[in-house]
Image: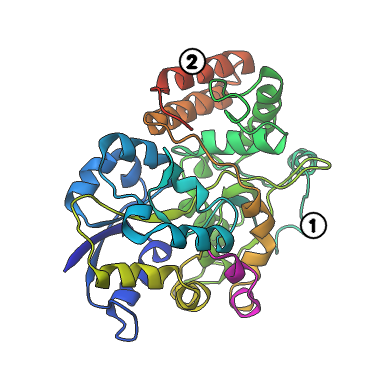
């Protein structure tokens, strides 16, 4: 029996567990899946997880750390280059390319997600399209919240910078963001944070979406990781509607890419049956049928535009696909995860104290420079 590790949420576990048990699925009965909290992937070094599990579900910013530790097989070495070529055409947005580092891919995009807009349709009659519209909503007293807990303060900041035309550390991998764009992004988020409910500030995206569905204190969150599961009512929770992230005039909607990939740890020597099982998970039947039917969020583009899939989930996919296609991919060098944590803490303090944007931007650049370890983006 192979051992797999994923995250403790229906989106992360249900489809994998069901596929392992379904006798009609290739390689069924081969993988026993354990779960850990989503935050566990931020706190536990990837090498430690790979030492205990054969298959590991991971987030793409961990690949630099994994390559440095030598704890994952490359996908090219296990499944070959032809699969990569096929998935390059089939995967939505940068969900596959985000796992490419040092010339190879280190995971397959099992799940695709990005920061999008979440709305309680019964609390607001209109949907903002541009960032200036979001600020106008706040000024008009519409209850708007930002996702700023844990690493999400930095991720929301990155998304706004990218929407304003400067995806962080892309034009110059040594420079996080220019002062001009950084100040504008900081001002937008700071305005939202100053007016948002206190109870929402410490919540991760799952908690924030749950709060939106259960209470009437938040009508809109312009940037939060999309979870298809919250498109349906459940246990007294009202359904949310998801839309593309805000943009600026003439620009695209942008969110910071999330999602998860499935990787083969170096402790494993995958046989043909295990390979067949993973390939089945990446195939059309699973991605367009089985995974959405079991609370998962597929990475295959055609699933996001599938009429039946969208009808079942309140048009979650088609309403947010444009944002995913234009998602911002974070740096992936070893040392990035610690930077992300520290940057988020610095941003939260700045929002709470109404500190000068210049000071926090200088701090972010210093933290980012220190995180660089000769790694590539």
Magenta highlight on residue 190 = no
Q: Between marks 2 and 1, how big is the CA–CA gap?
A: 40 Å
Q: Mark 1 or mark 2, which is nearer the start of the sequence?
A: 1
Numbered disc 2: secondary structure: helix
Residue drawn at x 26%, y 36% as measured from the top left? 69
Residue 63: horizontal and vertical position, in percent? 38, 41
Q: Is residue 49 left or right of residue 240?
A: left
The crowd level at tag 2 (other Cα within 10 Å; few <14, some 14-19, many 20+) is some
Along the viewing direction, whichever of 196 and 84 lies nearer the viewer:
84
- Which residue bears the numbered disc 2? 366
| Dominant SS type (magenta) | helix
Name the image quarter holding residue 332.
Answer: top left
Q: Is residue 215 left or right of residue 270?
A: right
- Which residue bears the numbered disc 1? 126
Along the viewing direction, whichever of 70 and 212 lies nearer the viewer:
70
Q: Is residue 237 above or below residue 29?
A: above
Numbered disc 1: secondary structure: loop
Residue that protrudes farthest toward the bottom in the picture: 24
Give the magenta part as a residue range. Answer: 299-310
Residue drawn at x 66%, y 20% as measured from the top left? 178
Q: Is residue 57 visible?
A: no
Number of numbered tags placed on the structure image: 2
Residue that protrudes farthest toward the right in the picture: 249
Q: Is residue 158 above or below residue 36?
A: above
Name the image quarter holding residue 20.
Answer: bottom left
Image quarter hosting the N terminus: bottom left
């Amino acid at each position: 029996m192979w051992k797999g590790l994923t995250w403790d949420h229906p989106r992360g576990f249900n489809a994998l567990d069901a596929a392992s048990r379904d006798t009609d699925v290739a390689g069924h009965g081969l993988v026993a899946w354990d779960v850990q909290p989503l935050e566990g992937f931020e706190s536990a070094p990837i090498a430690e997880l790979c030492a205990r599990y054969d298959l590991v579900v991971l987030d793409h910013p961990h690949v630099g750390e994994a390559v440095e530790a030598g704890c994952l097989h490359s996908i090219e070495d296990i499944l070959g280059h032809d699969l990569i070529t096929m998935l390059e055409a089939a995967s939505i947005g940068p969900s596959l390319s985000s796992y490419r580092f040092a010339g190879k891919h280190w995971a397959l995009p099992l799940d695709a997600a990005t920061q999008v807009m979440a709305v309680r349709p019964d609390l607001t009659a209109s949907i903002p399209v541009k960032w200036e519209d979001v600020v106008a909503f706040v000024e008009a007293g519409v209850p708007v919240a930002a996702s700023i807990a844990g690493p999400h303060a930095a991720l929301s900041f990155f998304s706004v910078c990218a929407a304003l035309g400067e995806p962080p550390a892309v034009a110059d991998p040594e420079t996080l963001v220019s002062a001009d764009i950084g100040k504008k992004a900081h001002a937008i988020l700071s305005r939202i944070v100053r007016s948002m409910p206190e109870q929402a500030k410490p919540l991760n995206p799952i908690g924030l979406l749950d709060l939106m569905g259960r209470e009437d204190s938040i009508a809109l969150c312009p940037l939060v990781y999309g979870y298809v599961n919250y498109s349906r009512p459940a246990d007294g929770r009202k359904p949310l509607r998801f839309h593309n992230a805000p943009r600026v005039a003439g620009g695209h909607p942008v969110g910071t890419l999330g999602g998860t990939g499935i990787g083969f740890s170096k402790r494993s020597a995958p046989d043909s049956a295990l390979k067949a099982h993973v390939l089945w998970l990446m195939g059309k039947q699973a991605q367009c049928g089985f995974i959405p039917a079991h609370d998962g969020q597929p990475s295959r583009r055609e699933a996001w535009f599938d009429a039946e899939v969208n009808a079942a989930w309140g048009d979650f996919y088609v309403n947010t696909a444009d944002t995913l296609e234009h998602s911002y991919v974070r740096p992936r060098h070893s040392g990035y995860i610690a930077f992300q944590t520290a940057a988020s803490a610095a941003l939260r303090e700045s929002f709470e104290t109404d500190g000068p944007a210049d000071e926090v931007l200088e701090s972010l650049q210093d933290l980012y420079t220190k995180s660089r370890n000769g790694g590539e983006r």
